[in-house]
Image (cartoon, rainbow, N blue to C red):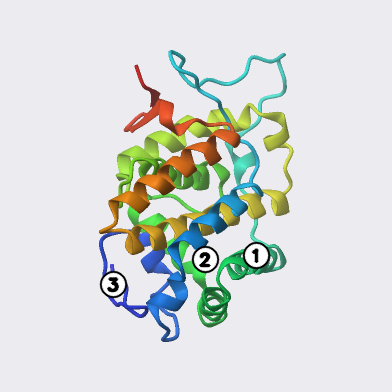
Amino acid sequence: MSTRTVFRFTAPSRALILALLLSAAPASAQAVGGNASSLSSSIFKLMNQVGPAPTTPTKGQTPAPVTQTPAPVIKPAALNFKVSPAVRKKVIDNFVATITEGSPESGAEWNKLFKSSDVFAEIDKQVKTMFGLGTTNLADTWAVYWSYAWLMTRSRTDDPTRAQISGLRNQFQPLLLAIPSVAALNDAQKQEMSDTLLLQVALYGVLAEAWKNDQASRDDFGSGLVSGTKQMGLDLSLVTLTDKGFTVNK
């Protein structure tokens, strides 16, 4: 991966955020990153726009699909979606507006980045290179999102392994397919959920870089993230990320 530092980010791996910088116009790291606390607040606002997690593990239980009456078999391809430029613009506009609420300067720089670069093309390239997955399938993007979210709750700034992402993806696919409301989503709804999650991962990368030498801020954000994701239906404090996906802590 390129080590170009357009926004003067140094490059611990956090490849998903660095991917955003590969073809960007020059700007300052401070402006894009803005105030870290305002960005963390933006993340929690964005989280409210995403649907519930596919499973709610509790201590002593293994995540599993909810038992339901027999229904027609839903093929994995049902989680794929076709990208709509209009939906993508809606997600980007909402993302920039949310960032701008906390930091107008940062919002302006993110807006410049989106206008000067095909951000999602770079994210897609990195997801394929690092994990062998794509960004037009909900199981893939849920795996990317929840793996990075879990790392952040552990105050970590590294990337998940390819095996961990693969295990989580394989775990999420049948769970997502078992939820009628997910299977019933149209392409626009699936894309809006997926794109929003991927931009949250980009913000995780910004925060990881901003706080790489600030353990206290990482810990504080991690605690807030546990609370936020719990409201989405998955208590990250109860699980460990492994090559088989999430396993419940004993």
Residue 64, percent from left and from top: 53, 20
Residue 246 at least partly seen: no
Residue 230, percent from left and from top: 54, 33
Which image quadrant is residue 10 in?
bottom left
Residue type at numbered disc 1: Arg
Residue at the spot 72% in from the left edge and 54% down from the top edge: 188
Q: Is residue 24 above or below residue 97?
A: below
Q: Residues within 10 Å of mark 1 (few under 14, many from 20)?
A: some
Q: Secondary structure at mark 2?
A: helix
N-terminal of the pair, mark 3 or mark 1, is 3
Q: Which residue is mark 1?
A: 88
Residue type at numbered disc 2: Phe
- Using the numbered discs, state the Cα–Cα distance from disc 3 to disc 1 in whole angstroms: 26 Å
Q: Count the marks: how many?
A: 3
In terms of depth relative to the viewer, which is nearer, 140 or 217? 217
Residue at the spot 43% in from the left edge and 40% down from the top edge: 223
Which image quadrant is residue 211 in?
bottom left
Residue 208 at least partly seen: yes
Q: Which residue is mark 3?
A: 2
Q: Residues within 10 Å of mark 3 (few under 14, many from 20)?
A: few
In terms of depth relative to the viewer, which is nearer, 65 or 218? 218
N-terminal of the pair, mark 3 or mark 2, is 3
Q: Secondary structure at mark 3?
A: loop
Q: Residues within 10 Å of mark 2 (few under 14, many from 20)?
A: some
Q: Is residue 47 above or below residue 173?
A: below
* Residue 89 falls left or right of residue 194: right
Question: Residues at badges 2 and 1 in contact (C-beta under 8 Å)?
Answer: yes
Q: Which residue is mark 2?
A: 120
- Using the numbered discs, state the Cα–Cα distance from disc 3 to disc 2 in whole angstroms: 17 Å
* Residue 234 falls left or right of residue 5: right
Q: Secondary structure at mark 1?
A: helix
